[in-house]
Image (spheres, rainbow, N blue to C red):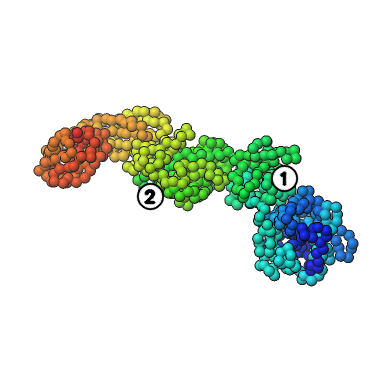
Amino acid sequence: MKKLFILFLLSFIFEGNLKAQLVINEVLYDPSNIGLAGDANGDSLYSQTQDEFIELVNTGTTPFNIGGFQIADSSITVNRDTVRYVFPSNTIIPPGGAIVVFGGGLPKGLFGSAIVLADTGADGLSMANSGEVILIKDNLGNVVLRFNSDALSNNPDESYTRNPDITGAFVQHASINTKKFSPGTKVDGLPFSTSNGKLVILKVDMNELGTAFDSVFVKGNFNQWCNNCNALTDANKDGLFEINSSSFQDTLKYLFVYKSGSTFTEETLTPNSCTILSEGKNVRMLQLKTDTSLRSVCFGSCSACTNKLSLQGITDFVTPFGGVSGKGIHVRTTANIADLSSYGLGIANNGGGTDGEEFKFPKTAAASGSDILVVRDSVAMKSYLAGCWTKFNYIFIDIAGVVNQNGNDAIELFKVGEVAETYGNANEDGTGKTWEYTGSWAYKSSGTWINGALNCTDSSKATIYDTECIYPICVGILVSEITVSSPSSSISQNAGTLQMTATVLPANASNKSVTWSIDSSSLASISSSGLLTAKANGEVTVKAMALDGSGIFGTKKITITGQANSIAELNKVSVKIFPNPIENVLHIESDKTVNEYKIYSMDGKLILNGKVEKNQIELSELFPGAYIIEFKINDYSSSYKFIKN
């Protein structure tokens, strides 16, 4: 219940040599009970008892050992002292430094790098609003400082603090600052001493603990090995707890502690380079020369927790869908992961250095050996990867647009906010480097990175299997044989059709898809499903090519008769080509105007197409070999074989 008394500071009495060494600088005995306005200890809870505090400052030039000193109170009307708190042994206040004792709770915050302690008793410091004297006694029980009060404060709901700090008279805090208190700091929020302390950032990874816990603390020679004085925080809920603290020791000794219910459990460490034997147990040890930010360690270990996720591949495919549809990042689990949200990704664009963790994996478990793909466009990528899509155990869509890498950008894998692995170099543009993957991919094979040829996906027609640089995970079990069959070996009906079938072996081939083609488009056409349609009399070779990059294909010859476009009709588009073989220029003669041509390889792939100009075609860029050229005039076409030297 909030006390409704009034306090006024009357005097401080300094005794012996403490007068120049130790002062009471601020006291909060009446915390405000309006919302969290009285939450002085920063634990996000208001408590009349726990948010009380007293702040002491060492004004001397040497460390002050306050261990064994007592905080007591004495009633003005009854000559009796009651001890409320005893400082832990060997509690050292550095020169110019401060120490704060709260009535209880779990203080959270920097508090100006002051030493922060909390009374763990049910009654706390029990500082009344009037009618008592607060006493500081030495370790022999002698009174060395007094804080005397009486009824002139008019229920302040705030602390009393010296103005100026250390030497001035006591005034209500809000009369000189909008805040109601400033435990551990001067009224203006600045620390009492910055010349002796060293800032230390400590981080502990709790993901491997394997047991439930409520909170994490650090204890050490900087807080007199207090279990619950310095709480660590996990702002982004990734299992990494950290704290910014200060130590006035050259040798920092400490342990991490977790609290479950009312039980505190500290680390058990084996002798290692990070430990030192202190009072019969191994504790962490750090030599401090400057401000230090340490990388994370696993609870109970001198090393970081095991990285269970690995970069496996990066894609910059040029797909028929365009844009960013071919961009993806492939990772693989190396062990069971209970919570993927400990991991994330970052893109170091254009060699400008790390941009930090930009994509965070969702909170889900993943089994060991799982392949995980992060993509911008799942619909396009599913179509492009075709049968390979099912190779991935998890697909995550990057709706924030983080996966925007070009083939010259480094990729970073993060664990608990720290870089765990990098592909490429975050500080250089990868153009022309061995790790560039523009229009292609990079893939880790048996621990070694390999790359597809640059721009090898630029000519993709439909899927990755149209290219000569199939993404390695998509290869799987390759096709070894294709047999092409049909109900008949001929078509005799005008514009008749024949359904072709491809039998693919082995039966468990990873990708059994095929693409259909014919050697003469003037005689017939064939659909993507293998339906052959006759156009002219003659013999056509039907081909089914595997789409898994194996290069395997099967063929069958079909004889076509009975078509209306007889030889006489074909003569309507008769074209003479010469010379044959050719060097660079192919000349043509025809009694019709020939405007367009198409050139196919002998396996039916379209190589070139264009307009005929001045009855000749420039083919100097064509590689030596045999080709089929097709001319089309109106609704008729004719094809001819030629050889390029």
Which quadrant of the figure contains the C terminus?
Answer: top left
Residue situated furthest left in the rendering: 591
At 70% across and 42% down in the image, what residue appears?
Answer: 266
Residue 406 in sight from this viewpoint? yes
Q: Note whether 479 is above or below 571 in the view shown.
A: above
In the foreground, 344 or 290 = 290
Residue situated furthest right in the rendering: 79
- Report the side of 503 relative to 84 (left or right): left
Q: Position of residue 260 (x, y in %)?
A: 70, 46
Q: Are marks 2 and 1 in contact (CB under 8 Å)?
A: no
In the foreground, 124 or 303 = 303
At 53% across and 36% down in the image, what residue appears?
Answer: 334
For the residue marked with disc 2, what is the amino acid? Answer: Gly
Q: According to the image, label 2 marks what residue?
A: 323
In the foreground, 235 or 194 = 194
Which quadrant of the figure contains the N terminus?
Answer: bottom right
Q: Position of residue 41 (x, y in %)?
A: 70, 57
Q: Position of residue 440 (x, y in %)?
A: 38, 41
Q: According to the image, label 1 marks what residue?
A: 264
Among the two numbered marks 2 and 1 on one chain, the one whose residue lies closer to the N terminus: 1
For the residue marked with disc 1, what is the amino acid? Answer: Phe
Residue 242 in sight from this viewpoint? no
At 15% across and 34% down in the image, what residue appears?
Answer: 580
State the count of labels: 2
Q: Identify the image quadrant of residue 382.
A: top left
Q: Position of residue 632 (x, y in %)?
A: 18, 43
